[in-house]
Structure formats: structure tokens, C-alpha cells
Amino acid sequence: MNRYFFYLVFVNMIANVVSSVPKILIGQRMNGAIISMVVSYILGLAFCYICARFFNLFPGQGLPDLTKKYLPRWLSGAIVLVFASTWYIAGLITLVTFTFLLNRFLTPDMPLLWITFTFLLFLTYGILMNSRSVLYTIEFVLICCIPIIAFITLKAYTSPELNWDFIKESFMYINHYPSYTGISASSYLLLGGFNLIIFNRLFKRNQQINWKNMLIIGFFGGVSLVTTYFIPIGMLGFEGVSDIVYPWITTSDTLRLEFFVVERVVYIFLLLYLAISFLSVLIHWHVTLELLKSVMSFKRLKWKKRNLTPYLFIVIFWLGAFATVSYLTEYELTTYTSYFLNYLLSSFAVMFTLFFYIKRRAKV
């Protein structure tokens, strides 16, 4: 399988460590969170495999190209618009989450709208790049960040502040039934491969996804899930962790690097995840833009022979981001994120039905 497919999967895994996913899972710790993670792990790997297998049948084609070819025009447009809205909200959640994080921990005196404006300014350039340049950007940032992420993760597991008794206490609730909210939140970490709906256009040759590929994804996905849930509990306590708004940020602040330039890991952690969150929003909103471009193009909206339709979509992205940051509180963000993840999991029934129908029509 093309290495860029793994990059798409890994960015989604890493970015959601500091988003609302840990908070949602920890909120379900007495309601079957561990069993929910086991179920979501199996589901997530199955979804990832099905998605990769489907797009491998259509090298060089994205979902908009396939829906135009095999579905009525009105239905194709409606489906693409729904997917565009879903991907936009996914990116918006990450953007708003990290805006709140920066305001709380790094720039408390800076207005939220100014933080959002700064974030959007850099994002806009990235979103408008061609898809291949986006993949190159992902590769460069990941190569720079992954060694540091691995070091911080190892530091967390070997820290004397990690109390394994709290983790053992969490296993006392393993006999509880899984919750739909827990499954939807934890399965989201393994869904980065669905960005192939656009990036598959760049994979011109037939790809093969085999058990070795799934083993790699399964290993890192399992480590990501376990780390996301258990490390904050071990550091902050099974009861105390429920009162923390951002469990992983507080967890990283318990770590120290005595012989490094910056002793408090939280500052390194925040800057590191700023880069990863940037990638996550970049991927989601680039996919959104490409989806919208495939169904809408205002031919008269031109300036110096350049069509301005993508810039109109960017303006809408900005307005949506400003409105959301102004309206939501941190508590509401977690609540609405939970609703969105619940919707996302249920939507896969429709998505896989669409995959099956296109495959039948294409006779592949």
C-alpha cells in the first residue's frame, strides 16, 4: 500500500489524542469504555480495510468521480455535499479545540478570534494547494514530529508519576456493556483512511492492502487507543481525571525533562500537537474543498482568467470557524463533538451501501 495512505491514517490517530476523544472516553470509564475500545478497534480496522480495498478497485479516481459515473446527477451532488459537510465539521472540531487549548495554556491574553484568524491564515494557503503538495507537507511534518511523539509516549509510560493502581482500578469496570458513545469516539482514531475519497486520485497504480499493512495499522492504532485512555487515568487518578477539561495536556504537564532546554514537557507537547492539528484540519478541509469543487463551479466568477469559486468556499470556511469559536464553550464543544461522532459512526451504513452499489454498477 502507498505510504501516503499510512500518513493519512496516522495523522488522524495522533491528532485526536488532544481533541475531545480522550475526554469522551474518560467520561465513559464507568460505562464500558474498555469494552467499547475493543469493539471500536475491531470495527475501525474493518472499516479501514474495506475503504482501502474499495478504492484500490478504482485507481486514480476519487469518490466524486465515481458517483458522477455511476449515480444520477442529482443524487451524486447530494451525496458529495453531505460528505463535504461532514469533513468540514471534522476539521472545524479540531480547529476550535486547539484554539481553546492555545488560549488556555499558551496565549491567555489573546482573543479567541485572533487565534482563529492566525490559524486560518496559514490554513488557507495549505487548503488551496494541490493534493500532491498536501501529501508532501504531511510527510515532512510527520517525519519531524513522530520521533518526539514516540519519546514523549515512552517518557509517559516510564514516568514514576504513572500510578498503575489507577489503571488497574479502571479494569474493574471491564464487565460493563459497551456504550455507543464510547465506540463512536474511540473508532474515530482509525478512520483517517477515508480521506482516500479525494487522495485516491493520486494513486494511479493498483495498490495492495494485505495482512502486513493491517498489522502495522492495527499495532499503532492499538497503542494509540491504549495510550489515549490509560495514561491520563494513571497520571491523574481514576476519580480525579473526570474533572480535567483537557486530560492529555494536564498529563503532559506532569512530565519533566531535567536535562533539556525546556524542562516542562507541556510546552513541547503543545507545539508538537499544534503542527499535527494543523495537518488534521488541512487534510479535512482540503478534502472538503475538493468535494465542493466537484459539484459547484460558478463560471462567471472570474478574475484575470482565474475562477474564484474556491476562494468563495474559503470565505464560507472562515465565517463558519469564527461563528463557531464565538458561540461555543469548551463544555458545549465536547457535547457537540460527541453528537457528531455518534452520527459519523451510524453514517457508515450509508457509505458502505454506496460502496457496494458503485462496485456492482462497475462490475469489478
Image (tube, rainbow, N blue to C red):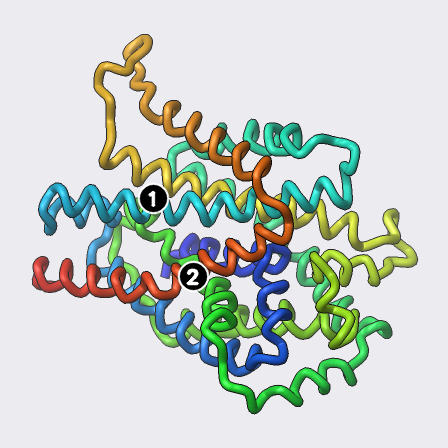
Residue at image point 39% right, 60% down:
343
Tell me residue 230's x, y (percent).
67, 74
Residue at image point 73% right, 56% down:
249
The mark nearer the N terminus, 1 or 2, is: 1
Residue 151: give its label: none
* Residue 286 falls left or right of residue 19: left
Kind of residue at badge 2: Leu
Residue 229 in sight: yes
Query: In the displayed structure, would residue 266 be above or below residue 73?
Result: below
Q: Which residue is mark 1?
A: 84
Local secondary structure at mark 2: loop
Local secondary structure at mark 1: helix
Residue 191: give its label: 2
In this view, the mark in front (1 or 2): 1
Tell me residue 54's x, y (percent).
24, 62
Decide which of 351, 153 is in the foreground and name it: 351
Kind of residue at badge 1: Ala
Decide which of 247, 62 is in the foreground and name it: 247
Total number of numbered discs in the rendering = 2
Residue at image point 23% right, 36% down:
295
Decide which of 208, 34 is in the foreground and name it: 34
